[in-house]
Image (spheres, grey):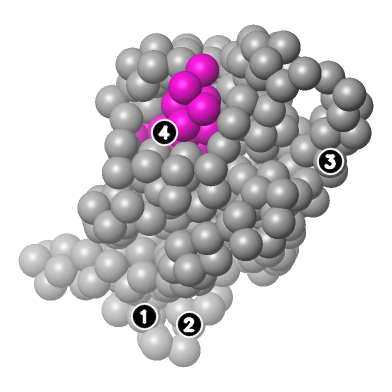
């Protein structure tokens, strides 16, 4: 579902600029989503798996309810065509389910004891910082390209950036796979921990003997989901925010890829959706501010704000139902 919902992040720019057909674009993105398994480590997975929620509050029902909340929110926002963050839906669901368990089994005043503040600070800060970095880099790259090619004829420049956009789309898909698949790894590790297949020390330190099976399973799943494609969101990302040409697609994807590589290495679970949306807005703003459809952008921002609390509430309700059923 993460790959399906977020496939728009990887392919919207390259499809909207007509550099690749939709079928080739999803195949290209899915391939590099999977190859990302061999790059950038597992720092984000460690943050999600053991750096945000105290493991003593996690059991198999918390994991199940967390996934339920995230999947329902992803399906709703896919239906509405809104490019929200699957990552934030996942961590929101994880927190909501764990808090519901604390409230039902201990006391309502203990719900915030499940949270590890250090893991949440950087995640919440980067809800704002990641799209701003994408926006600034996209704006600067677009401005630089205009200045470098200011005396060049449009057609040769267009042909050049059609080729370059294949590289930038591949780089962005690597960043997307490395960041988002790692979040799923963290949840898989949580499920294995609650089932007794992984120790707490494995999660906190080495990831144990299940290291590569977890990595390959998560990347294979996100690649398959990307190949299925969430076309409603592709339309919003690639056409409704601003009109893109190959040069703009290249600048947006490059800005997004740099942001994702940096945050993945730092172990910060950022939203790939927020990052590429900010980059697309930055590219569109180079032409003129009116080139960005701010009404659409405003709807997207509201969906971003609501994602964590909405998925948390859905996951908490799911846990309460499981608890009620015994």
Find numbered disc 4 in the image and state the secondary structure of the residue it sits on. Answer: helix
Q: Which residue is mark 2?
A: 110
- What is the spatial separation of the Cα atoms under label 1 and label 4, in whole angstroms? 36 Å
- What is the spatial separation of the Cα atoms under label 4 and label 3, in whole angstroms? 27 Å
Q: Is residue 306 visible?
A: yes
Most foreground residue, 108 or 82: 82
In the rendered structure, are the residues bearing label 1 and label 2 in contact, judged by CB atoms less than 8 Å apart? Answer: yes
Q: Residue 10 lies in magenta, yes or no?
A: yes
- What is the spatial separation of the Cα atoms under label 2 and label 3, in whole angstroms? 51 Å
Q: Which residue is mark 1?
A: 103
Tell me residue 249's x, y (percent).
62, 31
Q: Residue 143 bears which disc, if any?
A: 3
Q: Is residue 29 above or below residue 321?
A: above
Q: Nearer the viewer, mark 4 or mark 3?
A: 3
Q: Quadrant of the C terminus?
A: bottom left
Say whether residue 314 is left or right of residue 162: left
Q: Quadrant of the N terminus?
A: top left
Q: Which residue is mark 4?
A: 7
- What is the spatial separation of the Cα atoms under label 3 and label 1, in whole angstroms? 52 Å
Considering only order in the chain, which callout, 3 or 4, is on the residue closer to the N terminus? 4
For the magenta stretch, what is the residue range? 3-19
Find numbered disc 2 in the image and state the secondary structure of the residue it sits on. Answer: helix
Q: Is residue 272 visible?
A: no
- What is the spatial separation of the Cα atoms under label 1 and label 2, in whole angstroms? 6 Å
Image mark count? 4
């Amino acid at each position: 579902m993460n790959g399906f919902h977020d496939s728009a992040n990887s392919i919207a720019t390259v499809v909207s600029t007509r550099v690749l057909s939709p079928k080739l674009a999803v195949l290209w993105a899915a391939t590099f989503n999977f190859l990302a398994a061999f790059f950038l480590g597992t720092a984000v997975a460690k943050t999600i798996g053991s750096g945000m929620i105290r493991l003593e509050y996690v059991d198999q029902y918390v994991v199940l309810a967390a996934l339920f909340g995230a999947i329902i929110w992803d399906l709703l926002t896919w239906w509405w065509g809104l490019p929200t963050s699957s990552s934030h839906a996942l961590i929101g669901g994880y927190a909501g389910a764990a808090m519901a368990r604390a409230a039902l089994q201990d006391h309502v005043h203990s719900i915030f004891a499940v949270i590890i503040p250090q893991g949440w600070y950087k995640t919440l800060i980067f809800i704002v910082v990641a799209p701003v970095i994408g926006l600034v880099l996209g704006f600067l790259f677009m401005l630089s390209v205009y200045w470098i090619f200011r005396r060049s004829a449009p057609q040769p420049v267009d042909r050049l950036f059609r080729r370059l956009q294949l590289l930038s789309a591949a780089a962005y898909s690597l960043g997307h796979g490395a960041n988002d698949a790692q979040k799923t790894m963290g949840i898989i590790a949580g499920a294995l921990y609650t089932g007794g297949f992984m120790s707490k020390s494995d999660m906190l330190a080495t990831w144990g003997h299940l290291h590569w099976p977890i990595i390959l399973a998560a990347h294979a799943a996100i690649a398959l989901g990307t190949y299925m494609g969430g076309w409603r969101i592709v339309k919003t990302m690639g056409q409704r925010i601003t009109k893109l040409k190959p040069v703009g697609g290249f600048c947006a994807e490059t800005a997004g890829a740099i942001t994702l590589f940096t945050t993945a290495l730092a172990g910060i679970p950022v939203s790939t959706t927020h990052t590429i949306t900010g980059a697309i807005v930055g590219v569109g703003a180079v032409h003129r501010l009116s080139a960005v459809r701010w009404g659409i952008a405003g709807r997207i921002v509201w969906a971003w704000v609501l994602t964590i609390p909405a998925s948390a509430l859905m996951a908490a309700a799911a846990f309460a139902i499981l608890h009620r059923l015994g």
